[in-house]
Image (cartoon, rainbow, N blue to C red):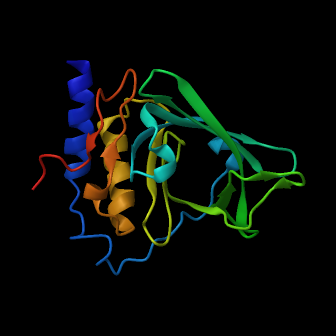
Amino acid sequence: MRFTAVAATLTLGLGMVPAPASAEESTTEVRPVRSVDLERYDGRWVQVAAIPQPFQAQCVRNDSAVYTVLPDGQVKVVNSCTRADGVTTSLEGRARQADPASTSKLEVSFVRTADGWSFDEPGTYWVIGLDRDYRWAVVGAPDRRSGFVLARTPVPSRKDVLGMAQALVRNGYDLCDFRITAQDGGAPDSAPLCAGQP
């Protein structure tokens, strides 16, 4: 019952916000939040929903990320998830500010070289929605090909879910591009975020 309620809260809560017809047709510009206090952003985040990415193909549940601010200003990133065989797998990377003037625009690398981390072809990580108490965050990119909805808990409140949805729609994302992430203690199965919505 609790699991069904979690999925319903996500689907119905996010579905209450009207979405554009499609992200490709949207003329809305993707805008990062004004600033991110990286020290407060530090810690573990649970993936609530995401646009499926190739690097997550092996993941069936429990996608999460742990961010640790390092003395040099970069952020250690450890992504983990559970595979179909029940094994937990993880991948370490580094994030850094893409623009020295903005803490909400980051670039991420999972390519390690003998000299450190290569940012020749970094991933784009823009924080486009953020709860003032850092309970949830929405991450996107200018081309809207990636999007991640993160929370500190696998069961965010309805109020938090609505805040997440508003951040996505405000930035021109189509909620139907996202899938709810299965989490132990949260949503029992992966499903389209807009399932059952008009």
- Residue 12 shown left or right of residue 128 in the figure: left
- Which residue occupies the foreground of this view, 167 or 192? 192
Which of the pair 122/149 is nearer the observer?
A: 122
Q: Residue furthest front?
A: 85
Looking at the image, which residue is at 25% across and 56% down? Answer: 176
Residue situated furthest bottom in the rendering: 27
Farthest residue, direction right: 115
Picture residue at 87% right of the left edge, 45% below the top: 71
Q: Point out residue 169 in the picture as x, y percentages from the top left corner.
A: 32, 63
Q: How many marks?
A: 0
Where residue 164 appears, as percent x and y from the top left, is 38, 50
The image quadrant of residue 61 is: top left
Q: Is residue 58 above or below residue 85?
A: below
Instruction: Work out whether 160 lies above or below 139.
Output: above
> Going by the image, does 67 lie left or right of 160?
right
Q: Position of residue 136 (x, y in %)?
A: 47, 43
Quadrant of the rendering where the C terminus is positioned? bottom left
Quadrant hosting residue 186: top left
Q: Where 185 sits versus 192, above or below?
A: above
Q: Is residue 149 visible?
A: yes
Nearer-the-camera pick, 86 or 23: 86
Res 43 visible: no
Name the side, left or right, on which 155 lies relative to 56.
left
* Image position of 49 (left or right of 99): left
Which one is in front, 91 or 135?
91
